[in-house]
Amino acid sequence: MVLMISGIDEAGKGPVLGPMCVAGILLDATKTDELLRIGVKDSKQLTGKKREALAREIKKVVENHFILEVSPSRIDELRKIMTMNEIMVICFTKVLEELRPDHAFVDAADVIADRFGENIREKYSGEILITSEHKADVKYPIVSAASILAKVQRDSLVKQLEDELGMEIGSGYPADLKTISFLENWVKDNNSLPSFARYSWETSKRILEKYDRNQKTLFQYE
């Protein structure tokens, strides 16, 4: 009997701008050496061009792959009723439902790695073995491959946004000064956040409050 395994990882959990992508791959367990042969490693250790080249090779090697794109507005909607960790469980489960492996290796999005895996297993509709670990994208080539697909997809979507706007928005992460500068200028010019911002993020709320023209200043109350 052929054992089919999957690797799942995300890109874009933390950014204030743009979507989150959760990628999964399905592979015959006896073919994991193929991933090492083509040079798969944690996506953070690779250049953008190398990730793009590897993404094409990965899709040739694996049996199947699936990338779930979660929009900023969908994330905001879900955060009204659940935590971000619960959202991650739902998204990882959705990817696994598409791939239907016997054994899944996942990069844990919870401080308690085993709990993350158990929550996925409980929501999954069938029988499945789950290995949930922190830094699984470094330890397991199959998760590294998923991390590459997720990162390439998210980068492509961010690039599309920049092309449509005709300006750079940075990586989308709150620590990126280019992203913060873009957001502040947008809010100053439009008195609102762009449609691709995550309204529920503290960064968004802080910038909105800072530049909200409708807020009265101390002098206006005198």
Image (cartoon, rainbow, N blue to C red):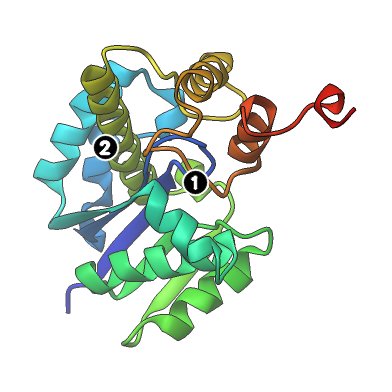
In front: 159, or 197?
197
Horizontal arrangement in the rendering, residue 175 relative to residue 65 (left or right): right
The quarter in which the N terminus is drawn is bottom left
Q: Pointer 2: what residue?
A: 153
Horizontal arrangement in the rendering, residue 167 relative to residue 110 (left or right): left
The quarter in which the C terminus is drawn is top right
Circle 1: is it few (<14), some (14-19), or many (20+) Cα within 10 Å?
some
Q: Which amino acid does label 2 sit on?
A: Gln
Residue at the spot x=51%, y=23% of the render?
183
Horizontal arrangement in the rendering, residue 216 relative to residue 13 (left or right): right
Circle 2: is it few (<14), some (14-19), or many (20+) Cα within 10 Å?
many
**Spatial CA span between label 1 and label 2:** 13 Å
Label ID, residue 195: none
In front: 3, or 168?
168
For label 1, the SS is loop
Circle 1/circle 2 CB separation < 8 Å: no
Q: Pointer 1: what residue?
A: 13
Where, by quadrant of the figure, is residue 83 drawn? bottom right
Q: Which amino acid does label 1 sit on?
A: Lys
